Amino acid sequence: MGRPADGIRVPAPGTDRTPWWRTPWWPLRAAAVPLLASLLTLGTLVAWTTTGRAGTPAVLSVRDGRVFVPQNPEATAAFFTIVNSGGSDDRLTGVTAPAGGRAMLSRRIVTGKGMHGMQMVSAVTVPAGGALRMTANTVDVMIKPPPRIAPGDRLTFTLHFRDSPPITTRALAVRPGR
């Protein structure tokens, strides 16, 4: 650039350039980086889900339903094996008991010095690719008041889950210890 006598810079002939931030393409250039990053992220997520790595929903089935023939007039317990062959955990959130009974999920706990007690729980996890096996020493369904049943009778229960639809199943009445 030449300098005229009055001190104002004047570009040399043929070197007139507009600053890069004032070019008409600047807004497109500024948007290109976030746009390309978003497209790359979206493409990666699509590839991840189409290859099955994003998981599949829980696929639940219930088997081995048993209910103890009541030994006392206060309560009895029911047990089920819930199998999850899907790719995501689900949670058993409640059980509907036969008419006239109230069903609650309970867990056996150690209260100290070899003593045990029961604690009500709001939900129990059914692991992906695994099973929840209810037993008298782990988790069960407490039924209050107990129904009048004899060994060999069958009772209908509905199990409710967080993400899966309810499953209605039957439990065979057995004497405790079987």
Image: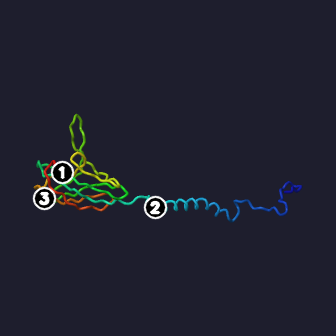
* Dot 1: element: strand
Instruction: Residue 134: give x, y in percent of width and height.
Output: 24, 51
For label 1, the residue is 77
Q: Residue furthest right?
A: 5
Cβ–Cβ under 8 Å for marks 1 and 3 = no
* Dot 3: element: loop
Residue 49: quadrant of the picture? bottom left
Alpha carbon distance from label 2 to label 1: 43 Å
Q: Earlier in the sequence, mark 2 or mark 1?
A: 2
Alpha carbon distance from label 3 to label 2: 47 Å
Q: Earlier in the sequence, mark 3 or mark 2?
A: 2
**Residue at 35 percent of width and 59 percent of height:** 86
Alpha carbon distance from label 1 to label 3: 14 Å
For label 3, the residue is 153
**Mark 2 or 1: the one toward you:** 2
Quadrant containing the N terminus in the rendered view: bottom right
Binning the other alpha carbons within 10 Å of mark 3 as few (below 14), some (14 to 19) or many (20 upward) gives some
Q: Residue 51, labelled with which disc?
A: 2
**Mark 1 or 3: the one toward you:** 3
Cβ–Cβ under 8 Å for marks 2 and 1 = no
Q: Please, what is the three-letter code of the amino acid marked with disc 1?
A: Ala
Q: Nearer the viewer, residue 39 or 80?
A: 80
**Residue at 13 percent of width and 52 percent of height:** 69
